Image (spheres, rainbow, N blue to C red):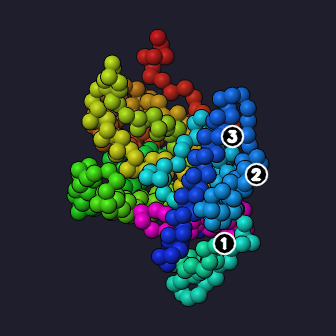
Amino acid sequence: MLTGRRYLLAFTPEQEEFAEKIGDACRVVWNTALEQRRAYRRRGAFIGYVEQARQMAEAKKDFPWLAEAPSHTLQQTLRDLERACTRHGTFKVRWRSKRKNAPTFRFPDAKQITVERISRRWGRVKLPKLGWTRFRWTRPLGGQLRNATVLKDGGRWYISFCVEDGLVESAPNGKPPVGVDRGVTVAVATSSGWMRDREFVTPGEAVRLKRLQQQLARQRKGSNRRAATRAKLAKLNARIRARRTDFLAWTANRLTRDHGLVVVEDLNIKNMTASAKGTVEQPGQNVRQKAGLNRAILAKGWGGLLTALEHKARYNGSRILRVPPAFTSQTCHACGHCAPDNRESQAVFRCRACGHQDNADVNAAKNILAAGLAVTGRGDLAVGRSVKRQPPEAEVA
């Protein structure tokens, strides 16, 4: 199977400056090619990778900075753009901003890349036009190299190798199924009662994060001090993001290792975390509360957990099943009674009909598992839809 290996690069100042130039060139190629595709579409025409690659080769004669960048990275940018336009539509693909998007570029030809281990802690890689550069050897490559991506994250440069590890998807492990509820107070709660949570920001970091954000808001745009503050914020956020990624990977590995079927809610996180500000004509309500909920959802990494589960399931012989989330937090697992009053608080669930009491997140996870078992019982795994979950009152009406 294809998998990734990410390492911290140790660029020299000259290499770091040149890597920034390559990233800028790829960003310009992306934006220019995207605008060209949109212009063609507006007049009912089409332009694809082949023609754009030919025009880019011609443009190198007039723009020396474009010729300095490795050809394969620029061509790969055009291929990535074509894939994005095919998948999402030309007018839905986003521009790449110099301020918001960190530089990144890919070397698609493994034959032009050489990787060596030089000591217990260090390795080195030879990249086209960048030459030899060292990186921290934190784990073996463990497979045949396919391509390499260089990216900047939190002020540091990384290289990500795509390798073929020679493994095949594991056979079903035959272990019991489990339902997983993702929450904002407790990140993960399962139908078996196992709960897992972690704070990704220390109290000191929270204070520093707030201070840097306030400082950034007061500084003049384009100033050197603002750029320095943005770099400090990026470094701090990268540290928080690394903790979250580690937590999600560990949790996903534990769940898929111990269970043959993991059932989760099919949540539309993008809509759930949309702003509640509204418009001038129709202003939103409870905007501050909604903003706080949005931050809490994103901080727990709901989407990242699902991605990690799908990745780990391939190696651990487990399956991931998504079911509709409707009424899982309001329905009593014991008797099936559904009412908003059943959930007394964030943590306490007490059924108004039968008196059953349980942790609210665990009760929801049990309902999620029941919905998943209903799907598997009908053989609808490809669809991933369970029986209709609706309050009894609505069904009667």
Residue visible at 54% across and 58% down in the picture = 24
Q: Quadrant of residue 357?
A: top left
At label 1, which amino acid type do we have? Pro
When the figure is inspected, residue 59 is found, relative to residue 93, above or below; the finding is below
Residue at point 54% right, 67% down? 19
Q: Nearer the viewer, mark 3 or mark 1?
A: 1
Location of mark 1 (residue): 128
Q: Amino acid at mark 2?
A: Arg
Determine whether the residue tagged by mark 2 lies in a helix, strand or loop.
helix
Q: Amino acid at mark 3?
A: Thr
The prevailing secondary structure element of the residues shown in magenta is strand
Examine the structure image and report whether residue 159 is included in the region drawn in magenta: yes
Q: Earlier in the sequence, mark 1 or mark 2?
A: 2
- Extent of the magenta region: 144-172
Q: Which residue is mark 2?
A: 54
Position of 346 compared to 160: left or right? left
